[in-house]
Image (spheres, rainbow, N blue to C red):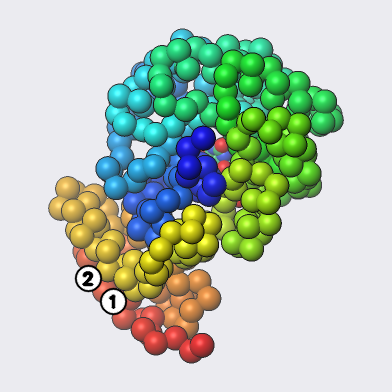
Amino acid sequence: MHPSLRFSVAPMLDWTDRHCRYFHRLMSKNTLLYTEMVTTGAILHGKGDYLGYSEQEHPVALQLGGSEPKALAECAKRAEDLGYDEVNLNVGCPSDRVQNGRFGACLMAEPNLVAECVLEMQQQVSIPVTVKTRIGIDEQDSYPFLQDFIETVAATGCETFIIHARKAWLSGLSPKQNRDIPPLNYQRAYQVKQDYPQLNISVNGGITDLEQAETHLQHVDGVMVGREAYQNPYILAQVDQRIFDAPGEPLSRHQVVELMLPYIEQHLANGGRLQHISRHMLGLFQGCVGARAWRRHLSENAHKPGVGIELMHEALAKVPLAQPA
Ligand SMILES: Cc1cc2nc3c(=O)[nH]c(=O)nc-3n(C[C@H](O)[C@H](O)[C@H](O)COP(=O)(O)O)c2cc1C
């Protein structure tokens, strides 16, 4: 298993882009970072640079969306050639757009197809091919249903599953509702680990602090944190010491901003917009005096044409260095 599986930041469309990952990486060297889901269609036929990332982001996993074994295998190969540390298949996204393409969570109903996809990908690459799934879809939410899915896919040699511990309703709920309304059932993920101890199981969904993460780690191999890591990113600063037993001290929030400045300057020098990066940093000071002023100064100004690095300094000056205990 990839040692970083123990703690990861979830793939999140529009959120975990390369700038976000660079920022997260400053706070934790060990956390496994996932890209946004990238579809095979975008990679094979699109014009954008969907796979670009910075060397500093390692360990970094590419999440793919698709259900065509050959296309997935070709994308996995490209990912390996580019140096990604893992390729992950999305079997959890419930959006309509994704279902029409016959991938995402609806693939839970087609374990043989998922197995075929994973096998084809594995044959192309030597980096781990992993699967992120739900615990069920629609009325198919029994443990035997999940077991059948896991067994079928694991038979290919796939060793690592990330389980978002709630089912998805494929019609009637929006993707956002599908992240909140179906109840969490961590026991299901724990049960998978008990029944298949040889597999690496990471649990995902609703984890909001490191105490919870530590509790889950008594039952499974890894935890994946999504929204909390994005909205309150400083949670990552203690991960290396607490979850990976690494030596050293967490950076302060101010230090994190300082370390972002050269990266932001480079981005601006390349013609990029400040907002592309600062938007991921809005939650950095959550819980601190000045958090609101920081957030507001950035969100009200970062989109304006021509704003430069001084905006970051101005925003930082609004947060006192010494915080009340
Ligand atoms: C804005 C947003 C975008 C997401 N995009 C993806 C995605 O591209 N691929 C995926 O597998 N899951 C995606 N998810 C789901 C998360 O990876 C995660 O499974 C879910 O948010 C539950 O974890 P959490 O409660 O820690 O946020 C997304 C979630 C959010 C909030």
Q: Residue furthest left?
A: 269
Residue at 60%, 48% in the rendered image: 223
Residue at numbered disc 2: 310
- Mark 2 nearby-residue class (10 Å; few <14, some 14–19, many ≥20): few
User: How many residues crowd around disc 1 within 10 Å: few (fewer than 14), some, or many (20 or more)?
Assistant: few
Q: Is residue 135 above or below residue 311?
A: above
Q: What residue sits 41% from the left and 14% below the top?
A: 124
Q: Is residue 25 left or right of residue 235?
A: left
On the image, the x and y values in percent for residue 116 come to 58, 11
Mark 2 touches mark 1? (CB < 8 Å): yes
The residue lying toward the viewer, choosing from 153 and 227, is 153
- Location of mark 1 (residue): 314
Residue at horizontal 53%, vertical 76%? 287
Image vertical order of residue 65 relative to residue 74, above or below: below
Say what amino acid the circle numbered 2 marks.
Answer: Glu
Amino acid under disc 1: Glu
**Rendering quarter of residue 53:** top left
- Mark 1 lies on a secondary structure that is helix
Q: Which residue is pictured at 66% across the width and 40% down the height?
A: 164
Q: Which image quarter: residue 316?
A: bottom left
**Residue 58 picture location, percent across and down:** 35, 43
Q: Is residue 238 above or below residue 123?
A: below
Q: Is residue 284 visible?
A: yes
